[in-house]
Each structure stands twice: as C-alpha cells, then as structure tokens.
Amino acid sequence: MFLMLGSLAQAASFTARADRYQLQPGESLLLTLELDQPDYFVDPDIEPLQQDFELISSSHQPLIEENGHAYSRWILRLQPRREGNLTIPALRLGELLSAPLRIEVKTRATGQPASLEPVYIDSSLDREELYVQAQAVLTVKIHHSIPLYSDGQLSPLTINGARVHSLGEPATYQQYIHGIRYGVIEMRYAIFPQSAGTLTIAPQTFAATLAGDDASSINGPQLTAPGRKIEVKSAQIPLVVKPPPPGFPANAIWLPARQLSLHQQLSPADGSIHPDQVIERRLTLDIEGLPAGFLPALLPEHVTGFRTYSNPVEHAQKETATGMHTQTQEQQLLVALQAGTTELPALQLPWWNTESDTLEWASAPAQSLQVVSTGQSENLTPHTTGESIRTWQLVSLTLALLCLLLAFLWRRARRLPAIIPPAPAARKSSRLLEELKKACINSQPQQARTLLDQWLRQHDYHLTSLARTQPELQTAMRELNQALYSPSEQNWDGDQLWHAVTLMLERQQQNNSQQLPPLYPP
C-alpha cells in the first residue's frame, strides 16, 4: 500500500481551487478538489477544513473525461465561520498534498439598512476603467429570499462596442444579509471593449415566478404570493475605456493581458542535425485576460535555409473565476537545405501588463543549428565508379520495364469505355465539398471545421499557409474559431466560409497550380 502511494505521489497531481476568493459576509463558496488518477479509490482528508469552514454539502465524481484526460473530482460547499482573511489548508490525499488557498471574507458593514425586497440584482465590475481590448469581469448576483420556480431567465448580456464571453456555468449558494437568508445565483462575464471612450453596460432583466411567501416584505403577502410573475432589473454601469498608451510599439499587435508567457521547443534539441532531417518547432503562448481570437500567429511562413511546413494554430480556452485563460500552440516542421551553421532568429512579442500598467516583452531566444554533411559524394574511387556503372545499368533496366508496362496499360486502356467514373479519392473529395457546403448553409460550425480539416488533409494543404495568401479565408476562419471556442453560444453564418473556399478554388484553377477538385462536381 505504501509503495503504491509513493508511486502515485510521483505521477499524480492533486489540486484545489475555489469558485471565488472574495466573499461577502454570509456567503458560501465551492471548493473543487481534483486528482488526475481516477482509479485511485481513497477520499481526501477534509478534517482540517472544520476549523474555519462549515461543510454544507459534498459530492464525488469518480470519473470525468475532459480534453482527452481523466480526472476524479470532489466538490465541497463551504460556509466560512468568521470574517477576515482565512486559509483553506493543504489537504491530504494519501501522500499527496493540495496547495493552500487564501480566502477573504469582507467585514460586515454597520448601520446599513437591510434590503426587504424578495428578489433583486446586484451587478459589479472588477475595475472602473481599462485599456481598449483589455478584460473587465462583470459579476451579476441574483438574490432571492423566497423560493423561485425553475423558469427564471436573465436577459442576454449584449454590449455595443464590446465582445462578451460567459465565464462558465452560473454558481448557486446561500448568503445571510442582516439575518435574512438569501439564495444567490451568480454569473460572471468577461468584457472586452473594442474602442476607446465611455462604454455603457445596460441593465439586465431577470424574470421568474414566485414559489413561496415572504413574510418580511413591506409589500404584503398579496404581492409575494406563489405563482406571481416578477421582473427585476440591474443597475446601468459605466466603464471608461482608454486607448493604448503611447509607450507601446506602434507597429506591434496590441496585447493587454494580466499574464503572458512564451515558450519554444525544438525536437531534436541537441543542435546537431543532418540535411533532410526533419526538425519539429513548437511555440506555446499562454495568456491570461484575452480570448483566442485576439492572439497573433508568431512563426514566420519562411525561414532562411529551411523548407518549412506549418500546421494550423491550435487554440484552447479555459474560463476561470478571474477571467479567460488561453493557450495557443503553433507547430512548424523544418528541413535544412544545406550543410553548415544556421540560426533560427529570436522571437520578440511586446505586451502590456494590465496589473502593473507597464510594457513587457515575451521572447523565445535564437537557436543555432549545426547541419552536418554526410560527405558520401566526395573522393570517388574506382570501386565506387564501378558501383555507379552497375547502378545505371539497373536504372536502365527499370526504365525499360516501365516502358513495357506503360505500353501494356495503353493497349488495355483502348478497350475501356470513353467515360470513366470518378476515382474513389475524387468522389470522396467531391463528397467532402458538398458536405462542407451543406454545413456552411445550415450554420453548423463544428461540422464545417471537421469537414474542412479532412478536405485539407486529403490534398496536403496547410491551413496556415492558405490563410496567409487568401485574406477571405483568413477572415472566415477567424469568425469560425470565435464561434467554436467562445464559451457562450454565438450565431455563426457559414456563407462567408463557403464564399472564401469558392474564391480559393477559382484562383487555384485560374493559376493552373495544384489541381483542386471541382467546386460543383458532375
């Protein structure tokens, strides 16, 4: 048993996270404990929590699969026992320990009159001003002191001049306000203004049906009777949006973020390679406070001294209580053209730290590669010359056999009908295009992206290279990615993508370059 725990401690990861780290008096929080070893049948020791927190409820999900990984998850609803700065201690699972978490419970205000409304909305921003395209987090809390039916609906958050992303599913908990117990439904949104000026966040409306009485209401029981429809609105909130600061480089892409890191990885990494050996170059960009649609592609299309093959950029978005966390990965395959010492130039990416309000640079250092010559073609001897002669004889014999085979195939082809049905590969390509067209017409983004990737792989096309030469395709892919990777459901119009594919096919056919399958097959 101890041996198993020891090996698990080296291989497994046991983490803890809270849905909120700042609480008002009387509020509860959700603590999630996660283990990336779902076949480990031991529960964590939560006894250390009892000192500062009361356990309201708990649940265990033994097997969860996300993004190709399996997890075991415990979800605990905790009620702080006091105000001030509290600590969720490190919790033990076998020999594994989670990291401690700091929780702030704000001090209860004195002299504040208690709200007697049975249902009301409290909306707040994490900042009153920010730079254009930077992230602001809007928290919307629906308080209700009497039960509500499950038909409650909050109006969608739409802001002119800003992009809005929902930060996960709504959280529910209880809060005591001046001795009155309220149920709270909390939603969080990430807001990204697109232009400088004063942005107005319009009021949101919450409509629901009352399911019980509120004896303390000043309006009397006749207005809080079960079955009555209610409608409440949040306050209108202004947000000051500033332009990029003058100290930011003028020719660089504006990237305001809380954190940003850039990592480059080469494989093989020893720096010594042979001609025609494939080098894999992978660039990973981690950023907090921006969605994937705002991030640029960093790897150049051409690298001096190499043949380059680029794969489409991969995006991964994660919503947390503090906002958006995005990771992009770019992969490029490099093949050296000649022997000698070559260098991959350094990559520099400026970004603006919104926490410290300063300019910072993320960089990937230059990499020096030594391409070693095999030297097999130097100093030919009579022996190697004789081998070359025999090689040419074999080549001549092979060509003669090929000529005989071609003559046989030509005579056989004369007996075949004049109209030959399309080859299976051509039929598959035509079918993929037809299905892609239907997915675009029916506005099905996931099916469209899958079909487009299959069609590109069939013809050895690279989406990154095509997008750089086809501006319509680049714009259409940006809209498609936003529809796919946005946490909130967005309407997607597939006409733009199909129009871009149509233009690309027509241009390829006009230039007589790589043969593409017909757009409208017979």
Image (cartoon, rainbow, N blue to C red):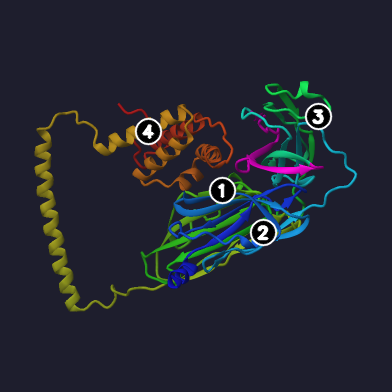
Q: Is residue 217 shown left or right of residue 341?
A: right
What residue did someone put label 2 on? 50
**What whole-number distance in Å separates the C-alpha atoms at marks 2 and 3?**
35 Å
In percent of the image, x 45 and y 72: which residue is there? 2
What residue did someone put label 4 on? 433
Image location (x, y in percent) of residue 58? 58, 50
What residue did someone put label 1 on? 317
Q: Nearer the viewer, mark 1 or mark 2?
A: 2
**What whole-number distance in Å separates the C-alpha atoms at marks 1 and 4?**
29 Å
Image location (x, y in percent) of residue 250? 70, 52
Q: Quadrant of residue 423?
A: top left
* Mark 1 vs 2: CB contact within 8 A: no
Counting residues from the start of the chain, the first of labels 1 and 3 encountered is 3
Quadrant where the C terminus sits is: top left
Chain part drawn in magenta: 152-179
Q: Is residue 335 shown left or right of residue 113?
A: left
Amino acid type indicated by mark 1 = Gln
